[in-house]
Image (tube, helix red, strand yellow):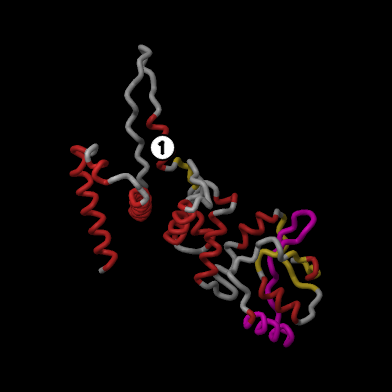
Amino acid sequence: MTELPISKLRIDGGTQPRAAIDASIVREYSEEMAAGATFPPVDVFFDGRAYWLAEGFHRIGAARSCDRKSFACEVHQGTLEDAKWFSYAANRGHGFRRTNEDKQRAVQAALQHPKAAGMSDGAIAEHVGVDQKTVWNWREQLFSTKEIPKSPTRRGRDGRTTKTSSAKRRAARKRKPHANGSEAAPAEAETDRPESEEDSTYYWARKIIILCREISECTLDAQKVAEHLGDSLEVIKKAHDYVEELLNSARA
């Protein structure tokens, strides 16, 4: 722990994890500080030149209002991007409780952070301190608006890296030559269905939403498309029945 001048702490790097600073909390902390209360140190990241505040914005705001010149800091060696990533996990289990808006802001920022590239929804959810479904919902929204790219791999909580479904399908479509030089038929797509029931539910929910979104954006004449479907109409009817069941379950 190091006592640093408050004037040296940078707060302009986008490391503020909350949607907004709560002025009433700053006043409350300021009154307690003025009465002699001791607060835990804030977290800062030092990149060799600047100290980036990553957690403790309400405490520093209160200290400034009390005209304090310095504050206790836990100094981590790292870049501004490291400070941002750290901030997304701030106040998960202590301090002033995060609002739903705070959590959503953290999830969106985490998904767009370089460290999240290839990370699974579960791994990001664990870091930010939210449920996996929240991360999945925001990932779909950011995919659709092209604010984040689709990654060919995902890194899980155990550190292992696996291919995503699209990457597996691309790999399965590659033709391998027979020993006699002729081309073999395309290999069957490797399954990418998760093993656990919970992950499988997220997998299918995501797949259904993606397909429904693509169908809803189709501008082709339905009658003309139907002329080319042939025997596939029965499959489409089953899919229609399932989607209708989903809608009825959601409305129930």
In this rendering, is residue 54 above or below 60?
Answer: above
Nearer-the-camera pick, 224 or 229: 224
**Which residue is nearer to you in this view: 3 or 177?**
177
Residue 154 can be seen, yes or no: yes
Quadrant in which the N terminus is drawn: bottom right
Locate residue 88, reporting x and y percent. Answer: 58, 62
- When the figure is inspected, residue 180 is found, relative to residue 237, above or below; the finding is above
Instruction: From the top left corner, tell me how far across and down residue 105 is, in percent.
Output: 55, 64
Residue 43 belongs to magenta span: yes
Residue type highlighted by circle 1: Lys
Q: Which residue is mark 1?
A: 168
Residue extent of the magenta highlight: 24-52
On screen, residue 184 versus residue 29, left or right, reads left
Q: Is residue 48 above or below residue 100?
A: above
Q: Residue at point 74% right, 80% down?
A: 65
Secondary structure found at label 1: helix
Residue 210 image position (x, y, % from top left): 38, 50
Determine if residue 200 is in view.
Answer: no
Number of other residues with Cα within 10 Å of mark 1, as a class: few under 14, some 14 to 19, many 20 or more: some
Q: Residue at x 76, y 72 (%)?
A: 71
The furthest residue to the top: 180
Give the mark count: 1
